[in-house]
Image (tube, helix red, strand yellow):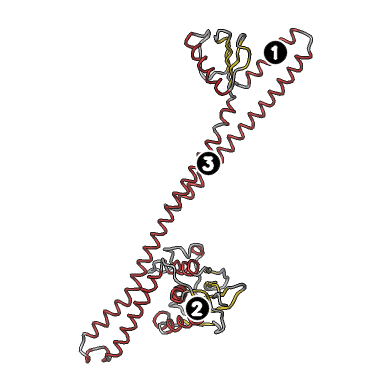
Amino acid sequence: MPRAWPVALASLFVALLVWYLISTGQIVRNLQADAQTFSRIYSEVQAGLTGADPSAELAALTKLQRMILELEVPLVVTGPDDEVTAHENLPFEVATPLTPADQERIKAYARTLDLRNPPVGDSAVQLIHYGMTPEAANLRWIPWLLAAGLLLTVLLGATVFRYQRRAAAEQAWTAMARELAHQLGTPISSLQGWVEVLGLPPDQRPEKMPQAEIASAIEEDLIRLERVSRRFELIGREPDLRAVSLQVVVAELRAYLEARLPRLGPGVALHVDVPRDLPRIQGHEVLLAWALENVVKNALDAVAGTGGSITITAAPSEGRWVVLRIKDTGPGVAPEIRDRLFEPGITTKSGGWGVGLTLTRRIIEGVHGGRIELLDRWERGATFQVRLPRAEEE
């Protein structure tokens, strides 16, 4: 449904544009016809002024009057006693000869004409009350209609924008809540299992696991819970940025993933090439690690089951930037979702919520003022490029 709004707005705009073009085209054609009529009037006046034959002058004046009437200008002629003596192009029908009611109706109409155009002539002889041509009358409404159409389009656009923005925010928060529940669910389930193991007699525990090993596993799950809660606590806040070693962040991420590669991605090789002398970046270590972890986990999902490799490289770039790339040898990103890959709810995983890359973009671009993009590659796989600003001390 939200995607139909832009089409509706575009259709409304096109309809207004077509109406405007047709209306203005018709007005131009009518004005051109009026110009021809005025030229003919001028020619007849010149002929009447230079003519010597009275009958020819009368014929010219009659022809001149007929041409003026062809302009469809509403005219009312009144005599010294304010009685209507002639009329042309009235917007209503009257009887012939005029009835007293018609006289009053025409006089009232003449008074409305005088409000816009003062009558011409001598009140002691006759006055001519005139109005606008139909084209001119229509022309005065066009700016108002255009303004109303544009205002309607703007109001509809603003309403649609607010609706889509609210819907996107609700979708993002829903996906984030599900992602939080998912990330908390794994260590909580693990802790429940360890509690059950602790409840068993020592000789009935799997492989007679000692108390110290169980305590170490519980501590690891608690650390993971603390990490998850800390990350989500930072979302929506303005964290303090400081000089961060990207090499250290990637090294910690590598250690975290390599310990889980046999379970998360069997047959997957992880290659890291981040020089130790890489300039430090201005960032937040916890959020940055989360953003990169989301991208690498997407790469793991892409190569899981078939095997392959994931390569993380980083190098200084022109200006005050450091560029990091995460490349995998998976099947790549489907063309139909490439343009919407960072939108909430967009995912290629059957069990995913489509929030990982959305959070990553928010962290990279919103928090760090950097840039993340999916590079166009002809070869197999996908390459994400992250550009981050160098620390101010560099």
Q: In this view, does 375 lie to the left or right of 298?
A: right
Give the vertical position of 369 relative to 309 (above or below). above
Local packing at callout 3 (Cα closer than 10 Å; few below 14, some 14-19, many 20+) is few
Location of residue 346 in the rendering, given as x and y in whole percent from the top left corner: 44, 64
- Picture disc at residue 34: none
Location of residue 104 in the rendering, given as x and y in whole percent from the top left corner: 49, 12
Q: Which residue is drawn at 43% across and 63% down?
A: 344
Q: Which residue is drawn at 55% across and 69% down?
A: 375
Q: Identify the image quadrant of the C terminus.
A: bottom right
Local packing at callout 1 (Cα closer than 10 Å; few below 14, some 14-19, many 20+) is some
Give the secondary structure at mark 3: helix
Mark 2 or 3: in front is 2
Q: Earlier in the sequence, mark 3 or mark 1?
A: 3
Give the vertical position of 108 relative to 306 (above or below). above
Residue nearer the viewer, 131 or 324: 131
Q: Name the residue under label 2.
A: 244
Q: Please tell me in which quadrant of the rendered image residue 86 appears.
A: top right
- Total numbered badges shown on the rendered structure: 3
Q: Which of marks 2 and 1 is nearer the N terminus?
A: 1
Q: Distance between the residues labelled 3 and 1?
A: 46 Å
Asked whether the viewer can see residue 227, the reply is: yes
Q: Name the residue under label 1.
A: 61
Location of residue 181 in the rendering, given as x and y in whole percent from the top left corner: 33, 70
| Amino acid type, callout 2 | Val
Location of residue 236 in the rendering, given as x and y in whole percent from the top left corner: 41, 66
Q: Residue at x 66, y 18 (%)?
A: 67
Q: How far apart are marks 2 and 3 (CA)?
A: 55 Å
Q: Which residue is drawn at 45% across and 66% down?
A: 358
- Picture disc at residue 15: 3
| Amino acid type, callout 3 | Ala
Mark 3 or 1: in front is 1
Asked whether the viewer can see residue 298, the reply is: no
